[in-house]
Image (cartoon, rainbow, N blue to C red):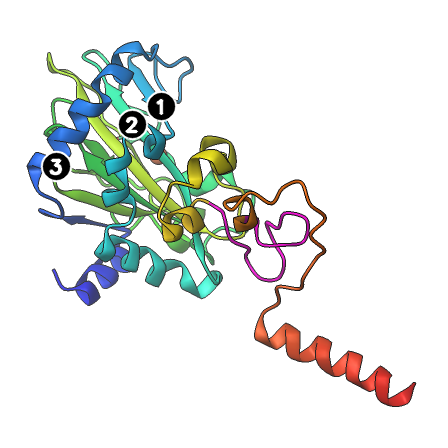
């Protein structure tokens, strides 16, 4: 699928399945790297997460090769294109590994955007990417996704049509909007279904996973700068997410124990208005 076709499918039906985005062997290696963490992580509690499922986050710290998924150029471009009407820069919302064990029930169908209490139907807050670590089949808990349930349809009654079963293999990626109705399927097989979610949201929202705690400066300092920016070490103009009135990236170079002094970080239109206001007072004064 061309980038334009991907964007129009995502906007048109609320999701798209991209085949062969990364070599299977790389995903299998990632699955192997995460295996000990899956082993030591207790089962989730609560009806939403589901008692026969396991989840953990902080994947960039746990397996650095997650960066290949997080900054996959085509997917990042798709997320940027989708969210750019509403923000200057996007941010990482979460990385989360999910295991759906045999016997797991289907997850409550939901829209991930509902974690934020903003207006529904006008703004897309989030782009989600599900990367299967094992095959996803109808009997083992493949993600269920409802076509055309996104955007303004999020204000309507739940769709009556059956969901699409996102059958995939490692290397594929299911991309869907925060407004698209979806949920993990039930696992009636004898094997564990494993996958990994990477999601991106508008740069001015509170992300689902607290990125600064997941990746404190001592960790993020070792990230390539664009990755550090994606996890929150940059301001969203005007001045949002600053540290001592500065870009939080100062913390990647040390610099947390000196008096820095605040510096405006304004959008060009705001800077122009502020400059004109200041200049008028100087003229009159
Ligand atoms: O694991 C899945 O297939 C979907 C999980 C999900 O949508 C969620 O936990 O929000
Ligand atoms: Fe979800």
Q: Residue at x 78, y 80 (%)?
A: 277
Residue linked to disc 2? 97
Residue linked to disc 3? 26
Instruction: Give above or below for 64 relative to 153.
Output: above
**Dot in front, 3 or 2:** 3
Instruction: For ligand 1, tell me if the residue under mark 2 lies within 8 Å.
Output: no
Residue 15 falls inside the magenta stretch: no
Q: Position of residue 208 (x, y in %)?
A: 47, 36
Q: Crowding near pointer 1: few (<14 within 10 Å), some, many (20+)?
A: some
Q: Which residues are magenta?
A: 232-248
Q: Residue at x 29, y 54 (%)?
A: 76
Instruction: Give above or below for 114 relative to 85.
Output: above
In the picture, the quarter occupied by the C terminus is: bottom right
Q: Nearer the viewer, residue 135 or 121?
A: 135
Q: Position of residue 140 (x, y in %)?
A: 14, 22
**Dot in front, 1 or 3:** 3
In the picture, the quarter occupied by the N terminus is: bottom left
Q: Residue at x 85, y 82 (%)?
A: 281
Q: Position of residue 212 (x, y in %)?
A: 51, 37
Q: Horizontally, is 39 left or right of 139 in the view?
A: right
Residue linked to disc 1? 56
Decide whether the magenta segment is chiefly helix, strand or loop.
loop
In the picture as drawn, the residue positioned furthest to the right comes out as 285
First-in-chain label (2 vs 1): 1
Let me know if residue 109 appears in the view.
no
Q: Is the Cβ of the residue at disc 2 closer than 8 Å to that at disc 1? A: yes
Q: Is the Cβ of the residue at disc 3 closer than 8 Å to that at disc 2? A: no
* Secondary structure found at label 3: helix
Q: Position of residue 95 (x, y in %)?
A: 35, 35
């Amino acid at each position: 699928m061309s980038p334009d076709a991907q964007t129009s499918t995502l906007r048109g039906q609320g999701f798209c399945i991209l085949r062969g985005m990364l070599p299977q062997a790389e995903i299998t290696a990632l699955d192997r790297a995460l295996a000990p963490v899956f082993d030591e992580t207790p089962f989730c509690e609560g009806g939403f997460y589901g008692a026969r499922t396991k989840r953990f986050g902080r994947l960039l710290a746990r397996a650095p090769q997650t960066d290949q998924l997080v900054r996959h150029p085509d997917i990042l471009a798709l997320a940027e294109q989708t969210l750019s009407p509403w923000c200057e820069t996007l941010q990482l919302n979460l990385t989360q590994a999910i295991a759906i064990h045999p016997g797991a029930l289907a997850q409550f169908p939901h829209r991930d955007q509902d974690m934020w209490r903003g207006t529904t139907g006008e703004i897309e807050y989030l782009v989600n990417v599900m990367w299967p670590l094992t095959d996803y089949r109808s009997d083992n808990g493949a993600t269920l996704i409802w076509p055309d349930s996104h955007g303004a349809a999020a204000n309507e009654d739940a769709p009556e049509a059956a969901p699409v079963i996102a059958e995939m293999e490692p290397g594929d990626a299911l991309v869907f909007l925060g407004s698209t109705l979806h949920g993990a399927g039930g696992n009636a097989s004898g094997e564990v279904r494993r996958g990994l979610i990477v999601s991106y949201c508008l740069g001015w929202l509170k992300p689902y996973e607290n990125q600064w705690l997941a990746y404190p400066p001592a960790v993020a300092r070792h990230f390539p700068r664009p990755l550090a920016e994606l996890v929150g070490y940059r301001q969203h103009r005007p001045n949002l997410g600053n540290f001592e009135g500065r870009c939080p990236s100062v913390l990647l170079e040390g610099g947390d124990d000196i008096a820095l002094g605040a510096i405006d970080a304004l959008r060009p239109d705001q800077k122009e208005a502020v400059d004109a206001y200041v200049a008028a007072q100087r003229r009159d004064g």
